[in-house]
């Protein structure tokens, strides 16, 4: 099965180089591990609440898609860096077009992983923090 969801409609954050595929995979699995091992800090009810919970700078956005072969797991989703306003606009359009996928949003590369927002296909926004 081929995944064609590439986050193409999401404007990329300027001034920051996109990480390599290997670095994007490492960032994704760090965010994914925080979902597994962390705790739900709060549920964000609206896009406006999500916007208020995100920092001013760029964020990592990853389509939560993992392929497994035996014991090996591989990040198979799309990865992008986006500013808060562009991310909220992208999410608003995806919700309106009924094309929202499961996403993880985290801090910019190099920043401490103190939070991750999990977005599901039903537009539920959960902010996770380390346990």
Image (cartoon, rainbow, N blue to C red):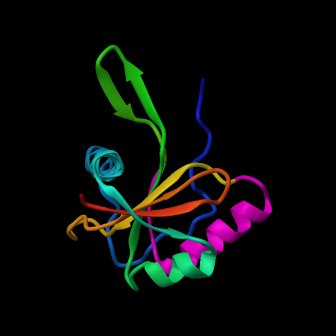
Q: Which one is nearer the viewer's eye here, 9 or 87?
A: 87
Residue name at image x 22 percent, y 71 percent? 111
36 horizontally vs 8: left or right: left
- Looking at the rendering, which quadrant does residue 58 occupy? bottom left
Quadrant where the image shows the C terminus: bottom left
For this orientation, the residue located farthest to the top is 70
The answer to which image quadrant residue 47 occupies is bottom right
Tell me which residue sits at (31%, 69%) in the image. Answer: 108
| Placement of the N terminus among the 4 image quadrants | top right
| Magenta range | 79-99
Of residue 2 and residue 17, the one placed in the foreground of this image is 2
Residue 125 vertical placement versus 72 (above, below): below
Q: Is residue 99 left or right of residue 59?
A: right
Left or right: 38 in relation to 95: left
Q: How many marks?
A: 0
Residue 113 percent location from the top left of the image: 24, 64
Instruction: Please tell me whether residue 43 is drawn above or below residue 47 in the rendered image.
Output: above
The residue sitting at 35% across, 61% down in the picture is 18
The majority secondary structure of the magenta stretch comes to helix
Residue 101: % across, % down: 62, 49
Give the side of residue 97 with respect to residue 3, left or right. Answer: right
Residue 96: percent from left, percent from top: 78, 64
Q: Does the magenta segment cover residue 9?
A: no
Query: Magenta includes 80?
Result: yes
Q: Position of residue 103 (x, y in %)?
A: 51, 53
Q: Residue at x 30, y 52 (%)?
A: 34
């Amino acid at each position: 099965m081929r995944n064609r969801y590439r986050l193409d409609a999401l404007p990329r954050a300027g001034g920051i180089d996109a990480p390599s595929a290997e670095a994007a995979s490492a960032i994704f699995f760090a965010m994914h591990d925080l979902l597994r091992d962390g705790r739900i800090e709060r549920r964000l009810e609206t896009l406006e609440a999500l916007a208020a919970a995100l920092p001013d700078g760029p964020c990592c956005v990853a389509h939560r898609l993992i392929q497994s072969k035996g014991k090996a797991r591989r990040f198979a989703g799309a990865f992008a860096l986006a500013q808060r306003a562009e991310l909220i606009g992208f999410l608003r359009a995806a919700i309106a077009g009924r094309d929202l996928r499961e996403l993880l949003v985290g801090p910019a590369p190099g920043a401490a992983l103190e939070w991750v927002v999990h977005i599901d296909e039903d537009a539920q926004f959960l902010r996770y923090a380390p346990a």
